[in-house]
């Protein structure tokens, strides 16, 4: 295989990956907004596990109250605490008491995406 055709083949593989919803924590309330923290979102570890979200994973946060959308990374919070804390500059976009949706995505090939089932949790009062 020539260098040109191998480069094309590699590019073609990358074109075949789709960014698919992997995990979702649906409609939780922000319990804290900490502007002075270095960044991220702190999430109750039990909610993280239920939604298959990992420490350090990039997530999208959508604020249902004001329409703000942001991306950050996850820090585990105290298990079963119901903690949803927006840290750093993002605290300017989201207020304590706001309802948010937290989502993570994964790259996968179209065939895998056809049958993939995301982990979605619907907490009550920020708890399972």
Image (cartoon, helix red, strand yellow):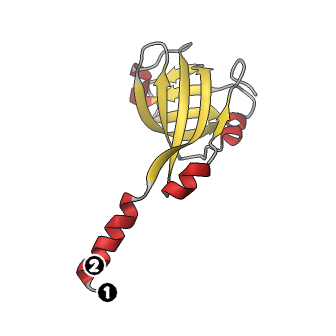
Q: Is the residue 117 above or below the residue 1 in the image?
A: above
Residue 25, picture quadrant: top right
In the displayed structure, does residue 36 sit left or right of residue 101?
left
Q: Which residue is located at x 64 percent, y 45 percent?
A: 117
Q: Residues within 10 Å of mark 1 (few under 14, many from 20)?
A: few
Q: CA distance from mark 2 to mark 1?
A: 6 Å
Q: Which residue is located at x 40 percent, y 21 percent?
A: 68
Q: Which residue is located at x 45 percent, y 37 percent?
A: 72
Q: Which residue is located at x 49 percent, y 17 percent?
A: 64
Q: Is the residue 41 above or below the residue 21 in the image?
A: above
Give how far across and how far down residue 20 sits, in percent. Answer: 50, 45
Residue 1: which numbered mark, if any? 1
* Most foreground residue, 23 or 90: 23
Which residue is denoted by mark 2 in the rendering?
5
> Is mark 2 in CB contact (under 8 Å) with mark 1?
yes
* Most foreground residue, 59 or 13: 13
């Amino acid at each position: 295989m020539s260098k040109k055709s191998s480069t094309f083949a590699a590019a073609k593989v990358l074109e075949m990956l789709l960014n698919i919803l992997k995990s979702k924590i649906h409609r939780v309330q922000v319990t804290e907004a900490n502007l002075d923290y270095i960044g991220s979102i702190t999430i109750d570890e039990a909610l993280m596990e239920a939604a298959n979200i990992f420490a350090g994973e990039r997530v999208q946060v959508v604020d249902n109250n004001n329409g703000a959308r942001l991306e950050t990374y996850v820090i585990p919070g105290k298990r079963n605490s119901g903690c949803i804390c927006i840290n750093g500059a993002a605290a300017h976009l989201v207020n304590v008491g706001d309802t948010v949706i937290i989502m993570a995505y994964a790259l996968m090939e179209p065939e895998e995406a056809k049958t993939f089932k995301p982990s979605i949790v619907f907490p009550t009062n920020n708890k399972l």
